[in-house]
Image (cartoon, helix red, strand yellow):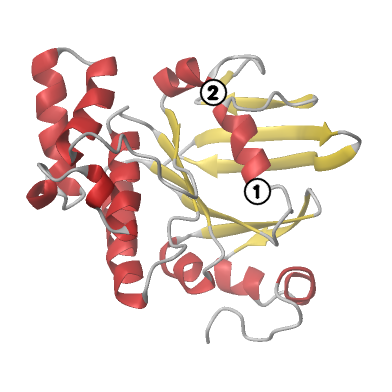
Amino acid sequence: MGTLLDVNDLSISFGGIKAVQNLNFHIDTGEVLALIGPNGSGKSTTVNMIAGIYIPDKGIIKYDGHVIPNKMDIANRAKLGIARTFQTPRPFANLTVYDNIYTIALLHNKYTEAKEITNDILKLTKLDNLRNTNSGKLSIEKRKWLDLARTMATRPKLIMMDEVMAGLNPAEMEASLDLIRAINKEGITVLFIEHVMKAVVSVCTRAIVLNQGKLLCEGEPREVLNNPDVVAAYLGGETDVAGN
C-alpha cells in the first residue's frame, strides 16, 4: 500500500482570513481517512483545493506520485481519478436515476461501456430498483446514494465524501455506511468529511482533525476523538466522544 494523495504546506486565505494554514497530511491507497473539525475549520476548503475548485495560495498536492499543477481544472482532475460529493446532492432532477449515472459515464466511456458501467454501479449502490425513478422524487438518503453513484461513474481512485450522513436517521446511516464499505472494497480510497462521530469510528482507519485552518492532531479515530485538545476545540467539552 503506497501513498495516493500527499498534501504539503497547503494554504489559502480569503480577504485576509487564513482559511487553511500550512496543512500537511497524506492518504494511503485503499484507506478510509476521516477529515474532521468544527464548522469553519477548513475541511471543505481543503477538499475544494484538492478538487480544483479553489487555487491554493501556496503548497503542493501530489496525487498518485505526481504533482498536480495548482491551476489544473476540475475536469482534468476528474480524469486523473479525483471525485467528490457535496453536502447537498444536486442530481439532474428531470432525469431518471439511470440517466443521471449514464450521462456521467458517457463522458468518460464509449456507449456500450457506459451502459455496462451504469448497470454495475446501480447494483453496487442498490439503486437498481429505482433506475426508472425521476431523481427529483428520491428521499434524501437515496439522493446521497445517487450522488455517490454519479461520482463512481467517473471511475475514480479517490472519492472525497462531504457529510454524506447529514440528515439521515440511524437506519439510513447504517445502510449508507455499508455502501461506503462496499465502495472502498472496490479499491477506491475515501476521504470522509463528517460530523457524525459514530460513523467516523465505524468506517475510518485514521482521522485527522483541523481547527482554525490548522492540523490539530491525527491518529486512530477513537484516540483522536478522546484527545483533550479535540474535545475542547471541536466538541465543546463533551467526554467519551467516540461512543465507548
Between 122 and 232, the residue placed more toward the observer is: 122
**Would you place residue 179 above or below residue 187 in this image?**
below
For residue 232, which quarter of the picture? bottom right
Residue at the image point whose x is 15% and y is 43% from the top: 122
Q: What residue sits right under mark 1 in the picture?
A: 43
Which x, y percent locates residue 64? 49, 26
Amino acid carrying label 2: it is Gly
Q: Which residue is mark 2?
A: 65
Q: Is residue 8 left or right of residue 180?
A: right
10 Å neighbourhood of mark 2: few (<14), some, or many (≥20)? few
Residue at 33 percent of width and 44 percent of height: 148
Left or right of 167? Residue 72 is right
Q: Name the spot of residue 187 as percent of width and height, x first.
A: 31, 41
Where residue 125 sits in the image (x, y, percent)?
21, 49
Does dot 2 land on a helix, a strand or a loop? loop
**Residue placed most toward the observer, 180 or 136:** 136
Question: Whole-percent x and y of residue 178?
Answer: 28, 62
Q: Residues within 10 Å of mark 1 (few under 14, many from 20)?
A: many
Tell me whether circle 2 and circle 1 mark residues in contact (CB < 8 Å). no
